[in-house]
Structure formats: structure tokens, C-alpha cells
Amino acid sequence: MTKFQRIQKISSIIPFYSSIFVFIVTMIELKRKHTSAKYWFLFCLTFFLSGILVYILNAVVMTGQHPVLNVIASGLLLAAANIICVDIQAKCPQKGDCEKPRNNKKIIIICCIIAGIFVVTVSIAVLILLTSPSIDIEDSNGSDTNLAVITMDEILTTKDHFSAFCSYFSNSGQKTKVAKALEDYDYDKVAFGCEKISGIKILQATKTECNQLTLNIESTLESGNMEIIIIVNNEYYDSVAVNQTHTIVLDNIAEKQVVLKFAAESAKMHISVTRELS
């Protein structure tokens, strides 16, 4: 194994980007050596299988509720793919060369490492799956987008209890002074979307010395039911209509805790929120 190939393996600690780099280098090496179809088959199998496993892991097993663990688990899977690709580079002979006898001991060690990474990844995924809420609330009222099952009392008293399929979440901006339990939702800009979600989720939380809070809320609901509500100091303040863009101004909110939540029943949706303090 060359020094460059060892560097490729070490680069696997950088998830996603290292895999793009290793995949491209592997294709270049296979083309340069005019290697046999067997090694191209091994590379294509590694490339497509790793992509499928990462997709299943993120879209089905771990659905975005724990983004850091998603990145770690996906990175471990792609690191295994990187190692296999580098080994393919090292072992593939140039056309016309004789293949060297296989080092069975080395192959066994590599297989054990890959198997260990796979077991750890699956164990983490199963643990998250078992400890996360599993909810699937049917859309039972047809074209009516109002909630049919989840009650207002449940929305007010529940923090985060939902199941999501193929979701994404982003946030940016400064933090305020919310309680520690709400720090993960304390951002100036928040966006969340999902192919299907059921349950109750917090979107944003604010606690500030400013007297006025302006919330710019944009939502789309393609299917299912959804309701967005604003809570001030643990009490219901207002509901926000879906499939619209709203600017809501809250006065006299200094030192009050403002929480934006939504409840969904089999909803395909997107919400973005931006706050302004004055």
C-alpha cells in the first residue's frame, strides 16, 4: 500500500467529503491501470451499497431527531466503504500483470474491522430506534387540514414526541436566554420539513429582555393535518394558519418564554421561522 493510499484511509475521519474524494481516486486508478471487470464490479458494488445503506439509515432507521448521531453513523458506514475502495486500489493489478497471491490474514482482519463497524452502527441505530417515540397517526378527515386526533391539551403539555420519515432541519443565528431544556430550539432562523410526520414538535423558543418579538412564519402542508401554535409562559397564546405566510408581533414579552410548536398527523410539510427582537 502506498503512502497516498494510507492518507486516503486516514481521511475517512472526515465524513462524506472523504468518500467523494476516495471514490473519484478509485475510479481514476481503475481506469489508469485498465484493470479487469472484477475490480470494477467490486467498486460499483461498494459505491451503490454504501449509498443505499446510508439512505436507509437516515430515512428509515434514524429519522433526523438526533442529527449528530446520524452524522456519526453515516460516517462510519462511509468510512468502511472508503477502506474497501482503497484496498481495491492496492490490490487491482495493471492489465497484463499477474495478480499477487492473496494475503488471507490481511483479508480476514479487514473483514473483521468492517464487520465491527457495521455491528456498532446497527447497534446505535437500533438503540435510537428503541428509545425514540414511534407514532403513526392516520389522516382520518380527508381534505380537512385540522387535527383529528391530537388535542390542544396534548400540544401544550408535550415537549417533543413524534415520528418522522425523510426529514430535514436547519437553524442559524443568535441565542437568547431560554431554559436549558429549550436551548436546542433557541435560534433566530429555523426551518423544518418532512415527507411524513406524526406527533408534536417544538420549532423555536425565545426568552429575551426586549419588549417586542416579531415572528415571520411560512408554512406549506401538502398532505395530512397540521396546527401551529404559539405558547407564552406555558400558556396558549395564538394559532397560526397553515399554507400561509404570517408576521406575528408579540408585545410586552420581556423575560417571558415564547415557544413555537406544531402538531401533525401524517403530514407532508415544511415550516420556516425567522424572529426579530426590538
Image: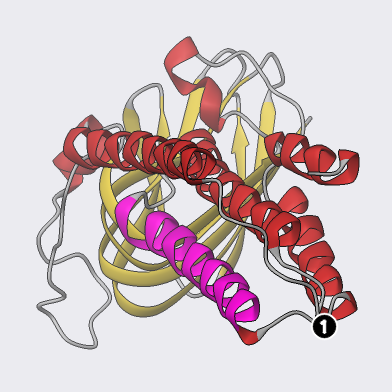
User: Quick check: 54 above or below 249?
Assistant: below
Is residue 276 visible to the viewer in this orientation of the structure?
no
Horizontal side, residue 104 vs residue 71: left or right: left
Q: Position of residue 127 (x, y in %)?
A: 24, 33
Predominant secondary structure, magenta span: helix
Q: Residue at x 67, y 59 (%)?
A: 100
Please rate how many residues cluster around mark 1, counting C-alpha atoms within 10 Å: few if below 14, some from 14 to 19, many from 20. some
Q: Say which element carries label 1.
A: loop
Q: Which segment did they paint magenta? A: 38-61
Q: Nearer the viewer, residue 6 or 36?
A: 36
User: Quick check: 233 above or below 167?
Assistant: above
Q: Residue at x 69, y 13 (%)?
A: 209
Q: Residue at x 79, y 30 (%)?
A: 278
Q: Nearer the viewer, residue 93 or 80?
A: 93
Q: Return the residue at label 1.
A: 34
| Quarter of the view holding residue 20 | bottom right
- Position of the N terminus, as image quadrant, is top right
